[in-house]
């Protein structure tokens, strides 16, 4: 086992990683849509580096901050400026940005003098920094804010949907949630309203369904705006692996696209399924279940995140490690 991982604040990670953020504008450095390289961030002696799936260090810890590789680029922070490295660790785009985000569709959102724009994988500005706020490109379009209103641009930077919304989220499955007169509805890629703005909260469409809040409960609508699953949940997430996390009372479980409870609400917390597994919290510890609800990695962690490229980040006593799908440590959380 490899030693020397720095302690982190678990409460902050829980807040940022596991709590549902509804209708936030997700300018998260990790937000992405691209090809993820199988390298994993580590922190050692206060510096960030990367290991491979076997736990071997391939990029020595040397950065003040670092994020995952997307499209063969990872953001890093040195002396309060952001740049990008390639998977060999070579600095490919020098630290120069006040903020920089993950590549998505081979463009990355950056901030220069409080304006948002987009660079290509060589670090050249593909779309000039001109927007008050912006989101990453997803499915060919990006939401941008101009004069306090949100619209959408294409890869050339051309406005294809004029700024007219109070807020706007990503396109997925051909639809995007937008806010009009303090209510959320959905538009298509031509900017036409296809589901009237009548919801207090919404999520993006996955597997043909989107979670919406009606009154004080969550249900799901289909692409025509019709209720597919009646609003009866206290919280509801997107579908993945034909399962969605829902909350009833104080417990979390999983439903199928018909609204049937397939995994009983018995968990104190739960995450969406990725790579066939989901992290759940029982008796104040996190473990993992499969899509049948069977515990496959016993609850033993203070915090556990989703699997990516067959490894998952876990926390024990404020220290960080990586496990594989057998629950074995690839990177040890011991000092």
Image: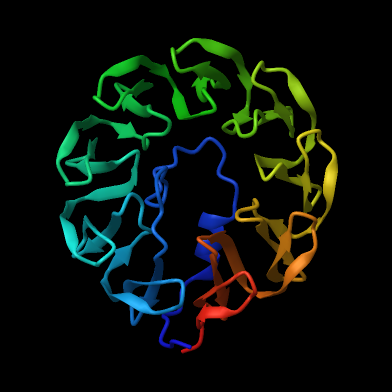
Residue at 71% x, 43% y is 244
Residues 326 and 269: in front is: 326
Q: Can the viewer see residue 181 in this picture?
A: no
Can you tell which quarter of the image residue 129 is in?
top left
Q: Can the viewer see residue 303 in this picture?
A: yes
Can you tell which quarter of the image residue 266 is in?
bottom right
Can you tell which quarter of the image residue 56 is in?
bottom left
Residue at 36% x, 59% y is 67
Residue 70 picture location, percent across and down: 36, 51
The answer to whether residue 209 is above or below residue 252 is: above
Query: Which color scheme is applied?
Result: rainbow
Residue 313 picture location, percent across and down: 53, 68
Residue 10 picture location, percent across and down: 53, 69
Residues 105 and 169: in front is: 105
Name the side, left or right, on which 21 lies relative to 289: left
Q: Residue at the far top: name it.
A: 192
The answer to whether residue 163 is above or below residue 240 is: above
Residues 81 and 68: in front is: 68
Residue at 42% x, 82% y is 5
Residue at 34% x, 38% y is 105
The total number of labels drawn is 0
Name the side, left or right, on which 240 lies relative to 188: right
Residue 72 picture location, percent across and down: 30, 54
The answer to whether residue 209 is above or below residue 35 is: above
């Amino acid at each position: 086992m490899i030693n020397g991982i720095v302690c982190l604040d678990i409460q902050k990670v829980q807040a940022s990683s596991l709590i549902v953020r509804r209708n936030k504008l997700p300018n998260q450095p990790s937000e992405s849509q691209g090809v993820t390289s199988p390298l994993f961030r580590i922190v050692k002696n206060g510096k960030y580096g990367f290991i491979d799936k076997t736990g071997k260090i391939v990029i020595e810890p040397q950065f003040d901050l670092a994020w995952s590789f997307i499209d063969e680029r990872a953001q890093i922070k040195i002396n309060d400026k952001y740049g990008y490295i390639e998977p060999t660790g070579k600095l490919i785009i020098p630290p120069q940005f006040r903020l920089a985000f993950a590549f998505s569709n081979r463009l990355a959102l950056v901030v220069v003098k409080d304006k948002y724009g987009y660079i290509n994988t060589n670090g050249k500005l593909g779309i000039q920094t001109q927007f008050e706020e912006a989101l990453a490109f997803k499915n060919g379009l990006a939401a941008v804010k101009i004069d306090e209103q949100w619209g959408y641009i294409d890869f050339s930077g051309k406005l294809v949907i004029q700024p007219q919304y109070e807020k706007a989220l990503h396109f997925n499955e051909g639809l995007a949630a937008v806010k009009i007169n303090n209510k959320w509805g959905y538009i298509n890629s031509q900017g036409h309203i296809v589901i009237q703005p009548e919801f207090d909260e919404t999520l993006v469409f996955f597997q043909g369904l989107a979670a919406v809040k009606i009154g004080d409960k969550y249900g799901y609508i289909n692409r025509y705006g019709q209720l597919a699953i009646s609003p009866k949940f206290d919280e509801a997430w997107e579908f993945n692996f034909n399962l969605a996390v829902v909350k009833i009372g104080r417990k979390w479980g999983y439903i199928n696209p018909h609204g049937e409870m397939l995994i009983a609400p018995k968990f104190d917390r739960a995450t969406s399924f990725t790579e066939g597994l989901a992290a759940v919290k029982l008796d104040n510890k996190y473990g993992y279940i499969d899509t049948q609800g069977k515990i496959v990695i016993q609850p033993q962690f203070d915090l556990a995140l989703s699997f990516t490229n067959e490894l998952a980040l876990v926390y024990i006593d404020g220290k960080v490690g990586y496990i594989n799908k057998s629950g074995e440590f690839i990177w040890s959380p011991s000092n």
